[in-house]
Image (cartoon, helix red, strand yellow):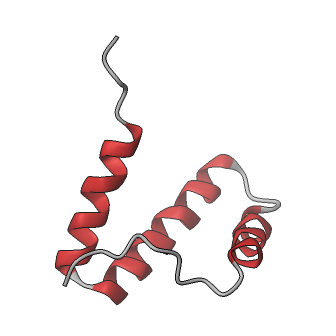
């Protein structure tokens, strides 16, 4: 199975708002734990191959560009 990068969210703005609301009132450490817990839950849902591909693509997206 390969990673689908097309949106499958019926209402992406609502999901984003829910994510922001989940972070509301948390200090930085708790916010990072929430992000980590969410990543692990979603990785478990999609499985090893897709999770590994998603990690690779996310890392590429944040790597500094030369220059």
Is residue 9 depicted above or below 55 in this figure?
below
Left/right placement of residue 5 relative to residue 1 reads: right
Left/right placement of residue 46 relative to residue 16 reads: left
Image location of residue 9, percent across then percent down: 60, 83
Quarter holding residue 10: bottom right
* Viewer-nearest residue: 20 or 1: 1
Judged from this view, the residue extending furthest toward the top is: 67
Residue drawn where x is 29% and y is 74% of the image: 3
- Counting the numbered discs, the total is 0
Image location of residue 46, percent across then percent down: 32, 85
Image location of residue 13, percent across then percent down: 75, 71
Judged from this view, the residue extending furthest toward the front is: 6
* Viewer-nearest residue: 1 or 37: 1
Is residue 66 depicted above or below 33 in this figure?
above
Residue drawn where x is 34% and y is 77% of the image: 43
Image location of residue 66, percent across then percent down: 30, 17
Left/right placement of residue 9 relative to residue 57 reads: right
Is residue 20 depicted above or below 3 in this figure?
above
- Quarter of the image containing the C terminus? top left
* Viewer-nearest residue: 38 or 2: 2
- Quarter of the image containing the N terminus? bottom left
Quarter holding residue 62: top left
Residue drawn where x is 50% and y is 73% of the image: 38
């Amino acid at each position: 199975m390969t990673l689908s990068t097309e949106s499958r969210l019926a209402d992406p703005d609502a999901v984003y708002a829910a994510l922001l609301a989940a972070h509301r009132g948390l200090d930085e450490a708790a916010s990072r734990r929430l992000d980590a817990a969410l990543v692990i839950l979603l990785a478990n849902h999609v499985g090893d191959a897709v999770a590994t591909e998603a990690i690779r693509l996310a890392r590429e997206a944040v790597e500094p560009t030369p220059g």
